[in-house]
Amino acid sequence: MTDADHFDKLKQAIIDQDEDEVLDAVNAALADGIGAKTVIDQGLLPGLNVIGEQFEDEEIFLPELMQAALAFQAAMTILEPKIKEEGTAGEKKGVVVLGTVKGDLHSIGKNILKLLYETSGFEAYDLGIDVDLFSFINKAKEVDADIIAISALLTTTLVGQRDVIDALKDAGERDKYKVLVGGGATTKEWAESIGADGWAATAYEAVTLSTSLVS
Amino acid sequence: MRFTEFLTEAEVRRTHEASLEVLETVGVLAHFAPAREVFRRHGCTVDDETGLVRFPAAVVERYRKMAPPSFTFRGRDPQFDRTIPDDGPIVVTGSSAPNVVDPVTGVERRATSADIANIAHLINELPGFDVFSISTLADDAPEGQFSLSRFYPALKNCLKPVRSNTPNMDDLHQVVELGQIIAGGAEAYAERPIINHHYCPMVSPLTMDVDSTEAVMWLTEQGLPVYTTVVPNAGLTSPMTLMGTLVVGNAEFLAITVFQQMVKEGTPIIYASLPTVADMRTGAYAPGAIETGVLLAAQAQMARFYGVPSGGYIGLTNAHSNDAQAGFETGMNTLLGVAAGATLLNMGGLFSSLMAFDFGKAVVDNEIALMDKRAYRGLEFSEENLALEEIAAVGPGGSYMGRNHTKARMKTTAVLPRLANRDMRAQWEEAGRPSIHERAMDEARRILAQPNGAVWDAALDTAIRQRFPGLVAGDAKPLEG
């Protein structure tokens, strides 16, 4: 099989949203001596690009996008150690700290966002749910984050997003990070009123927005 | 599924007995002499001077039991054939409006055969519709081709079953001949009659007309598909109680059903109606009022008692635009009918109490129809659908989003509307705050911009046009402007 055949197979396996097919294709490519970084860049990522376009065109639905991303994530458990061995790790798009705001236990949208960040070349640190404002700020400092992304589903917990921004201002560190807010309780107007750098209606849009903010 | 029922079993029986009493003691005026002959020959008492026919209860009981439990609509393409109640609820367009809201200017005007061609193409493509009842008249019909100018563009542009009526026997014979040419001959047509005839021979209260009765009698004799609708209007042509209106309509249904069985035993029928309560403030006709839904629901219950399929004109509206009134009148009434087990819904595309067809309304009604059909499916109870393994696999705090179980069912468990807006407000505002009517018209334009694969081949068209010279063009065209 030529390298081009391997790339086609890798790409198609992602488009098929089939984890087993993806893992088989990855192992076959590695066995034929293709580098882990090349497997990602020329096989899996082109597949994810197609998935992204299909999702935007409503050809596929959110569960299918999720399965493609989960298949990619499974492939990464094989590929990441190889990349370290190869010393071929490329530039990350950016570093993101994300979590659900204090008092709010909703995680599904935030988890989808994390998955999409990772499959789009971001380094994502997920602080989970019910995250207080200092955890956001301390983690961002620790990993030298580009973006802090804060989710809120409950209208009663919305103010927690503003609290993070205000605390960053008080500490004189507001300009160090781009702060994105999202989640079912938020609106674009809310994001503007609290001085956030961006707002997105969906996880997919949030990643697109993040990419433009860090480039 | 258990249907919504307003009446107890005893009340259903009493309603039936009351209807028998009306037929025996009050009787029915039959204006068509051959129909009176049919009644006389089969045991009814007929007064030829007045035209009054009285029905002994035993005669009604004997013949109404001959009506079969199902009715089949056939289309040019057999994959679109629909039988009720098993394939129900089936959704039919509203019919025979004189006017159309011009899809480009938005101004109401007389409808033409070109409109019928476009509507036929639209209904052929909209998945919520099962039967195309020809929505409008054709103001451009050449002399002597009043009905041909409706059936030709309708049949040419739609593979689904086409349904309509004719005003006289000459037109009826022409239309059946058109069907025979399309089918490839009289014999083939007798096998698969693709024109589904509908008439209202019962004129409330308790009267049978001449022209429609003659058409129903001839079609029944020929074994061609025909069903009828009874149309009581409380306060004008039936009593100002829903029960009194149910009884009048039920007696009329029994009279016409018995008539068809007397003409030919075992003729398939539908218990179809358009029951209304007139608005007594002005006498206005109110087919979108909620009482129509209540009456149709009760009628569905009576139809189950008789073992025949049921439905009718339900979900019409008095509204003149795609506004909230148009939505709630169509939505509430059709849902009531569906919940009660009515499996024929004559609901699509008309404004202004059947006066005008609107392309946007037809597209909105398609979406309402899909919701009605989903409601009729109910909860689909099964051990498998309890999804216990899946609940255990995901566990507390997990997500069902990326699961194969979800993926396999995400397109069938819920209706995925094309028009109902589920964006957040900001997205909707960014899109220019599109109204439901604008979105519906976009969809109509999208569909009509595509070539119509339903159109028959040139050889057949030539054969039809040779037999009926001067026929309208009957071609669907993209909406301009």
Image (cartoon, rainbow, N blue to C red):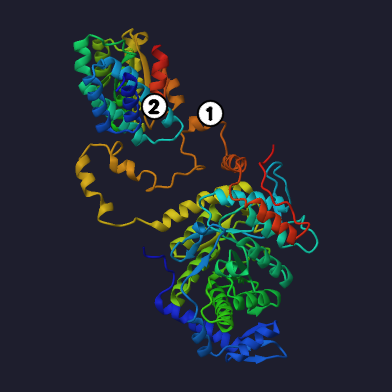
Report the quarter where the N terminus of chain A lies. Answer: top left
Read off the residue under disc 2.
A204
Looking at numbered disc 2 in the image, what kind of residue is underneath it? Answer: Tyr
Q: Chain of mark 1?
A: B
Q: Is residue B459 left or right of residue A1?
A: right
Total marks shown come to 2
The mark closer to the camera, 1 or 2, is: 2
Q: Nearer the viewer, residue B277 or A39?
A: A39
Read off the residue under disc 1.
B430
Q: Residue at x 48, y 51 (%)?
A: B370
Q: Position of residue B285 (x, y in %)?
A: 65, 63
Check residue B166 in the rendering and tell me which mark sits there, or answer none: none
Q: Position of residue A95 (x, y in %)?
A: 30, 14
Residue B60 position (above or below residue B323): below
**Local crowd size for mark 2, using a 10 Å CA cut-off: few (<14), some (14–19), many (≥20):** some
- Which of the 4 image quadrants contains residue A134? top left
What is the distance, in whole Å, between disc 1 and disc 2 at their CAs? 18 Å
Element class at badge 1 = helix
Looking at numbered disc 1 in the image, what kind of residue is underneath it? Answer: Glu
